Image (cartoon, grey):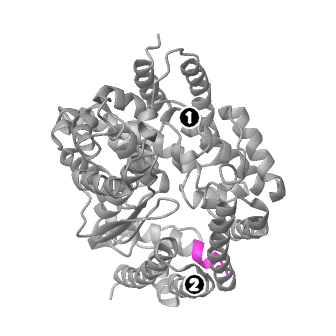
């Protein structure tokens, strides 16, 4: 067996274990009984240990050594083709990270992530940060320790962010946030000064949950979600996970008096799922069959949620169906009124329910707090007050309890520090990708009125999903659009759209 084939085989075996671990984590968030938490933490920790063993095995190390200098990552052979070269280099990057982490630490981190997440769930229900605080304090210390093992030479936060968005630095992300803030804040202020407000009260009427569920599944089918290879369930915090391109799970959150929440969560998670389903199944188990970065993954969810799902052409198709589902609630609301209601700009306590204009301010807040926690040793006990102060500064509203404040997101409970910036990066990527799709597909949005979303999905499959990790995020955006990542296209999109909705000059 050649070295490259041995690498594929070893990584495939590790991926089987990763899939099993992901099933347990998915079940923990959907169907697991509350009393099973301690046992589940032990099970996940055990599997994490096995995965670590497989990812650092001597067989994998020996195969990599035949092809690559394990210290520098430079090729030791010229026999590999372009795809094999990329596979070997990406496999080396993954091996280097795994090998840097002691097995005992991996097991400890995995176990704590599971118990911490369960503690967060209970604390959020009770709106009591104090009960979650010791779990978070330990998680912050574990993440600093992890960054120490993996250090890339920059800041501690740089190292952690690189795990989610390889190649992105704090300095680059901060520059993008600065550009956003300079134009977003005046735009939001201008919108808030408009005397004639958009009326979105129609969204808070009583909407039967079962009918919401059926409508959401219909929308998923329309955009290309394959229920033969995927399913949707309910969870407190919507998420998507994939065990294989032929087995992808999404979740959504339903509220009787909040129609927008479920609609957008379903489209958002559906976008993630379509990416997972579009990854090359023949490369499952190795980097060429994995997503490029979380920013690119987020671009797919935000594209379907916002650029498609919050557009006029989409509702030309979907609104008649929604009105047929809820004739009494929507009898006095026409399509244009509904479109405006869905796109109302209003400061929100909750990130996942924020409108397009204010959403990135929520992310910026978290980005800044994470750096203070990781780089500057901010005491965890000070988080609730700092969170509330920054919410008031950036968004103009102040949380009244921990659940709508510092406890609203699950990410810190399982150690995802450096994850939040990828949400904003996803917004930026999404607009640049979508602008290019409109150029490449004549009459793209005209087809939405007839329920034809396949041309867009096919384009995404060809240009993005099928690539796996054969390119980096920065290479992909340049290959697809001919441009580097920038805040300007996103800002231009927002200003054009919302100046139209609010009749601004």
- Quarter in which the N terminus is drawn: bottom left
Residue 114's place in the image compared with 46, above or below, is above
* Camera sees residue 59: yes
Query: Residue 333 location, x and y as percent?
Result: 32, 30
- Mark 1 lies on a secondary structure that is helix
Please, what is the dominant secondary structure of the magenta stretch? Answer: helix
**Left or right of residue 482: residue 50:** right
Res 309 → quadrant? top left
How many numbered circles are shown? 2
Magenta span covers which residues?
97-102
Res 456 → quadrant? top left
Query: Residue 467 location, x and y as percent?
Result: 32, 58
**Crowding at mark 2 (Cα within 10 Å: few <14, some 14-19, many 20+):** few
**In the foreground, 79 or 256:** 256
Distance in Å between CA atoms under marks 2 and 1: 39 Å
**Left or right of residue 491: residue 218:** left
**In the foreground, 325 or 87:** 325
**In the foreground, 497 or 399:** 399
Farthest front residue in view: 328
At a point 80% along the width and 58% down the height, the residue shown is 380
Q: Which mark is residue 358?
A: 1
Residue 274's place in the image compared with 233, above or below, is above
Residue where numbered disc 2 is placed: 36
Query: Residue 422 location, x and y as percent?
Result: 53, 50
For discs 2 and 1, the disc positioned in front in the rendered view: 2
Residue 467's place in the image compared with 1, above or below, is above
Sequence-earlier tag: 2 or 1: 2
Residue 194's place in the image compared with 217, above or below, is above
Q: Reply yes or no: does residue 101 show up in magenta.
A: yes
**Crowding at mark 1 (Cα within 10 Å: few <14, some 14-19, many 20+):** many
């Amino acid at each position: 067996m050649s070295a490259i084939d041995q690498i594929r085989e070893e990584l495939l075996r590790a991926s089987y274990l990763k899939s099993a671990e992901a099933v347990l984590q998915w079940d923990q968030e959907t169907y697991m009984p509350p009393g099973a938490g301690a046992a589940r933490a032990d099970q996940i920790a055990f599997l994490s240990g096995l995965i670590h063993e497989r990812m650092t095995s001597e067989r994998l190390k020996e195969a990599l050594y035949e092809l690559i200098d394990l210290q520098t990552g430079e090729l030791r052979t010229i026999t590999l083709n372009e795809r094999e070269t990329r596979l070997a280099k990406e496999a080396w990057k993954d091996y280097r990270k795994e090998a840097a982490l002691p097995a005992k630490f991996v097991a400890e981190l995995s176990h704590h992530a599971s118990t911490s997440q369960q503690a967060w769930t209970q604390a959020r229900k009770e709106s009591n940060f104090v009960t979650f605080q010791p779990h978070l304090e330990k998680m912050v210390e574990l993440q600093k320790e992890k960054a120490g093992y993996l250090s890339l030479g920059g800041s501690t936060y740089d190292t952690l962010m690189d795990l989610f968005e390889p190649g992105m630095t704090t300095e680059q992300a901060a520059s993008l946030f600065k550009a956003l803030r300079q134009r977003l804040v005046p735009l939001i202020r201008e919108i808030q000064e408009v005397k004639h407000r958009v009326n979105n009260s129609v969204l808070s009427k009583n909407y039967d949950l079962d009918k919401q569920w059926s409508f959401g599944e219909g929308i998923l089918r329309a955009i290309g979600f394959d229920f033969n290879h995927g399913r949707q369930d309910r969870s407190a915090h919507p998420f998507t996970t994939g065990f294989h391109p032929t087995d992808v799970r999404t979740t959504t959150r339903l509220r009787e008096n909040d129609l927008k929440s479920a609609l957008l969560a379903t489209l958002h998670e559906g976008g993630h799922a379509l990416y997972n389903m579009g990854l090359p199944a023949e490369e499952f188990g190795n980097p060429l069959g994995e997503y490029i970065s979380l920013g690119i993954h987020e671009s797919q969810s935000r594209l379907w949620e916002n650029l498609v799902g919050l557009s006029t052409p989409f509702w030309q198709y979907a609104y008649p169906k929604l009105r047929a589902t809820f004739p009494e609630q929507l009898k006095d609301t026409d399509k244009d009124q509904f479109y405006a209601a869905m796109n109302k700009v209003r400061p929100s306590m909750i990130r996942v329910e924020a409108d397009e204009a204010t959403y990135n301010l929520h992310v910026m807040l978290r980005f800044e707090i994470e750096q203070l926690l990781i780089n500057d040793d901010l005491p965890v006990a000070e988080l609730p007050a700092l969170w509330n102060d920054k919410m008031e500064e950036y968004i103009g509203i102040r949380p009244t309890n921990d659940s709508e404040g510092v406890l609203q997101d699950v990410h810190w409970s399982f150690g995802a520090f450096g994850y939040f910036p990828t949400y904003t990066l996803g917004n930026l990527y999404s607009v640049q990708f979508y602008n290019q799709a409109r150029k490449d597909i004549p009459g793209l949005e005209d087809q939405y009125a007839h329920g034809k979303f396949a041309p867009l999905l096919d384009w995404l499959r060809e240009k993005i999903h099928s690539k796996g990790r054969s390119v980096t995020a920065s290479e992909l955006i340049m290959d697809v659009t001919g441009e580097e990542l920038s805040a300007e296209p996103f800002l231009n999109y927002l200003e054009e759209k919302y100046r139209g909705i609010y009749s601004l000059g």
